[in-house]
Amino acid sequence: MDTIASFFSFITTPVSWVIVQFHTVYGALFGDDSGWAWGLSIVSLVILIRICLIPLFVKQIKATRAMQTLQPEMKKIQERYKNDKQRQSEEMMKLYKETGTNPLSSCLPILAQSPFFFALYHVLNGIANNDTIGVINDSLLQSAQKAHIFGAPLAAKFTDSSADVTALDASLTTVRIVTAVMIIMMSASQFYTQRQLMTKNVDTTVKTPFMQQQKMLMYVFPVMFAVFGINFPVGVLVYWLTTNVWTMGQQMYVIRNNPTPGSKAQAAYLERLYKHVTHHGKTRGRGEKAIVKAIVTKGRDRNEFERKFINGLNKAGLTAQADGTVVKGEAQVAAETEDGTATSAATPKRQQPKRQSKSQRQSGSPKAADEGPSLTKSEGPSLTKSDEPEDTKPPAAAKKPGGTRSKAQSGQRKGPQRPKSPSKK
């Protein structure tokens, strides 16, 4: 243990110094030996570490989005090599290498917290063993040993014996109840965070190794916390429960405001965005503009929810632009008055000309054809036969032999008839 503690000494001293500084502030409010002073010092340490890890979290989100954009290519590889798992894995790794993505990037925040976690563990373990560590001197050591959180000493563990707990001025039953409740809460918060990611913020249309990895972590991490948690001091349980709650809230914020394309969270987000845009007629903030811009850029590659969003805007008379803004469509702009109020008048439709009667078509009058639908029975020249000048009447057609009329009989084609070929006898 001393070897491990010396190995983490480079981080143990800064961690103990930060805890002592927070303890000075909270000790003035709750008392130096109060469990609230030491407990809130650990909580503040977690918050400080997580704030420093926000750039790493942003990098994790970008890496996760990059993995999601590769899902169509992953699906093609799976279909091409569905009977050859080894070749499928090789092609997947080749795709990761070419695009510069890493499927393990989702574990970066946990890996970055590991040094602080082990440093805090050794600080609290030193308090339990009555050893000074880092900047914690004898007076601070005695104060930390007297601190109790819900009746459990800061350095007590679930596996401690009755003698160890009695030495810390506590009850074994109280220690085990408090530690058991904290271990359950810690495992449950970790499971809920991972399940929330899998059920709401993952595109389930494509099965990828990334999804299998996330599904495995959803069950592995809670079990790990439950198994190893019985060996954690109460102070470490406070640390890990706090960081799990922070991760859960951070994940909920990301799912609500920057969901994965094709997920249930995106469907809910686009529905809220559609209601806001149709109500106000514009997008708000850089985040919404970035989402709309990404959807417009995809073109025909949009998923079902994105196509529904764009079609809904078009039906509402709005158009999404390439820069992420939303403007009113041409039909709606033309229907507005100068003072900006919308009118019920719509763009006039193109009217089709009225169909001419049979007598009008036979007469072939160019004026009637030009005037079209404007001619009525009361207006324009009459097109009856009696009104035509006699000099413009066509000469009477000579009757054909056999007494047949020149006009086409009913059912015959107008114009010159094709002579019938003589019948063969």
Image: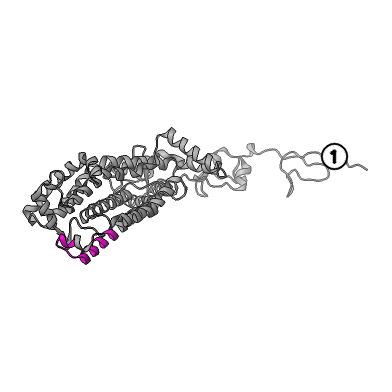
Q: Quadrant of residue 35?
A: bottom left
- The residue where tag 1 is placed is 421
As helix, strand or loop, the secondary structure at mark 1 comes to: loop
Q: Residue furthest right?
A: 425
Residue sitting nearer the eye, 120 or 39:
120
Q: Is residue 373 left or right of residue 332?
A: right
Position in image of residue 216 (x %, y %):
41, 51
The image shows residue 199 at horizontal and vertical percentages of: 39, 54
Q: Is residue 233 above or below residue 424?
A: below
- Counting from the top left corner in percent of width and height, residue 368 is at 55, 41
Residue 415 left/right relative to 93: right
The quadrant the C terminus occupies is top right
Is the stretch drawn in magenta largely helix, strand or loop? helix
What range of the chain is rendered magenta?
165-185
* Residue with the most extreme top position: 98
Q: Nearer the viewer, residue 209 or 140?
A: 140
